[in-house]
Amino acid sequence: MEIDICFYNEDVNYVLISKRKIRSWLLSVIEQEQKELGTVSYIFCSDSYLLAMNKQYLNASYFTDVITFDYTEGRFISGDVFISVDRVKENAKLYQQKYFQEMLRVILHGVLHLCGYKDKSEQEVKQMREKEDYYLQKFDLDD
């Protein structure tokens, strides 16, 4: 089994900063969740690209910031996490967050899905937000 966290662009020219630091942070999240890393691919794309995927694979016709395809087997988490850079930018403004902070939240959100967390019910959303807040505090933005 291949083991890695990879970052790709689909139809945007997005440059993720601090990749090495983000990989290390995500690995510590995975370990703290008592999982092991398989292969996790982050694919950065546009609103229109992710909307088309949302329609095709999830039969939903609304914009979203992230879609996670989970290929996890047992304790080994693997998956593809598609992130709309357009939507993250809009949400950062909406929630009055710095863009990079919002991007980290969405990156983390994808890996938390792969660790088994859901966000369909009110209780699941609450638990997901608590996990996001907890792990975001562990990422040192000043480092």
Image (spheres, grey):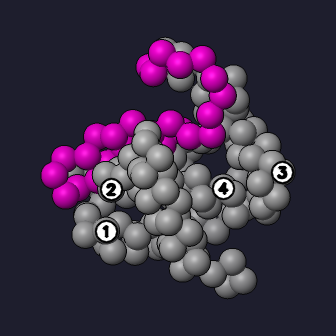
Disc assigned to residue 93: 3
Secondary element type, mark 2: loop
Local crowd size for mark 4, using a 10 Å CA cut-off: few (<14), some (14–19), many (≥20): many
User: Which residue is found at the position 61% from the left and 61% from the top?
Assistant: 104
Residue at mark 4 to residue at mark 3: CA–CA distance: 12 Å
Q: Can residue 88 be seen in this view?
A: yes
Is the residue under label 4 in contact with that under label 1 (CB below 8 Å)?
A: no
Residue at mark 2 to residue at mark 4: CA–CA distance: 19 Å
Q: Which amino acid does label 4 sit on?
A: Met
Residue in the foreground of this view, choosing between 133 and 2: 133
Left or right: where 143 falls relative to 1: right
Which residue corresponds to mark 2?
Answer: 115
Residue at mark 1 to residue at mark 2: CA–CA distance: 7 Å
**In this rendering, is residue 102 above or below 56?**
below
Which residue corresponds to mark 1?
Answer: 33
Residue at mark 1 to residue at mark 3: CA–CA distance: 30 Å
Q: Earlier in the sequence, mark 1 or mark 4?
A: 1
Left or right: where 90 falls relative to 26: right
**Residue extending furthest bottom?**
143
User: Which residue is found at the position 77% from the left and 54% from the top?
Assistant: 95
Left or right: where 32 falls relative to 8: left
Q: Quadrant of residue 90?
A: top right
Q: Can residue 113 be seen in this view?
A: no
Q: Which of marks 1 and 2 is nearer the N terminus?
A: 1
The residue segment tinted magenta is: 57-82
Which residue corresponds to mark 4?
Answer: 103
